[in-house]
Amino acid sequence: MEDGKMGNTTTIRAVLAILQWWGFNVTVIIINKWIFQKLEFKFPLTVSCVHFICSSIGAYIAIKVLKTKPLIEVASEDRWRRIFPMSLVFCINIVLGNVSLRYIPVSFMQTIKSFTPATTVILQWLVWRKYFEWRIWASLVPIVGGILLTSVTELSFNMFGFCAAMVGCLATSTKTILAESLLHGYKFDSINTVYYMAPFATMILLIPAIVLEGSGVVNWLYTYESVAPALVIIVTSGLLAFCLNFSIFYVIHSTTAVTFNVAGNLKVAVAVLVSWMIFRNPISAMNAVGCAITLVGCTFYGYVRHLISQQAATAQGPRTPRGRMEMLPLTAEKQGDKI
């Protein structure tokens, strides 16, 4: 009886964790798109910088003041040798995501982001010379096919936004791959990751944001009619971006890897639906089919990866050097969306 109650409690906790993660993620995406489209604040570098500043402050309060997580100590030389390069890629990833949001619909951007597993595998194969089972390559076929179908049928296609989103996928994959070597020996959770990377990202982005967008921001402050409410929305998006990172920490500790993978793909579907309901961007039938194929492909890829990891864990005896194979591509499955 007690086991049944504990099981029900665990299930309820997992469902609540997933729902609050979906809520923060979709809200951040929608607010960012609202800032660029409705508030006419077309400055993705500045918006990203606001997010980094809010996340830096939020992570400091969470760790130093509220002590919700213990601080993972990092040697000073490692901060520049390991954390800084990761922060640079991290910064590029976030900026490109916001740039793509300015030029293309949320539905298209979210679908392109689902291409990340494929870019991760391809990068590891081309650059790091790692090899994968044929099942991994086969599972990428629907993802690639879905992305191609979505791209050629996108009614609001913009080449600059498309390229920004695709390069953002490469940046996400690079960050994930580098994490294994640069952060070796440190077991970071999402809050400690933000605590160390967000200040570096702010430092990296602040000067480019001032130089490239400073005059435009000043002009917007003088010409936009309702500046105060708009600024509240912009700062709120930064606060919610930090809350998103905190929600990732909660959902990771409340669900299994398989549940996390499926919930992540369903989250994309929810974001696409909500964004369409708000912004009413035109979506053709074939475009919706392409998006669906991509999400199903991502779910299938996650299942194949989990299946291979289970088989590798139960395999007996050492493998020969010839038979050694990189069974699993590195992905940000347990880190999710950052800032």
Image (cartoon, helix red, strand yellow):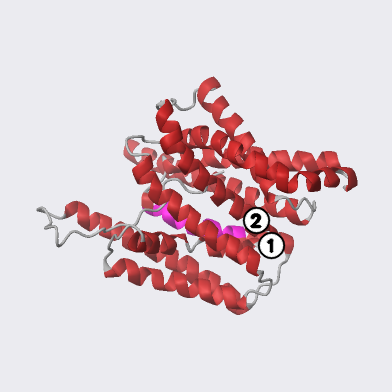
Binning the other alpha carbons within 10 Å of mark 2 as few (below 14), some (14 to 19) or many (20 upward) gives many
Q: Is residue 226 left or right of residue 332?
A: right
**Dot 2 amino acid type:** Val
Residue placed most toward the observer, 262 or 42 = 42
Q: Which mark is residue 325?
A: none
- Mark 1 lies on a secondary structure that is helix
User: Image quarter for residue 254?
Assistant: top left
Q: Which residue is mark 2?
A: 99
Specify the segment rendered in magenta: 258-271
Residue 266 sits inside the magenta stretch: yes
Q: Quadrant of the C terminus?
A: top right
User: Image quarter for residue 267?
Assistant: bottom right
Q: Which residue is mark 1?
A: 103
Residue placed most toward the observer, 105 or 217 = 217
CA gap, disc 1 and disc 2: 7 Å
Label the magenta part by its dominant secondary structure: helix
Task: Tell which residue pokes out farthest to the top in this image.
Answer: 65
Q: Name the residue rendered at 72%, 50% in the picture.
A: 43
Residue 119 position (above or below residue 151) = above
Q: Are marks 1 and 2 in contact (CB under 8 Å)?
A: yes
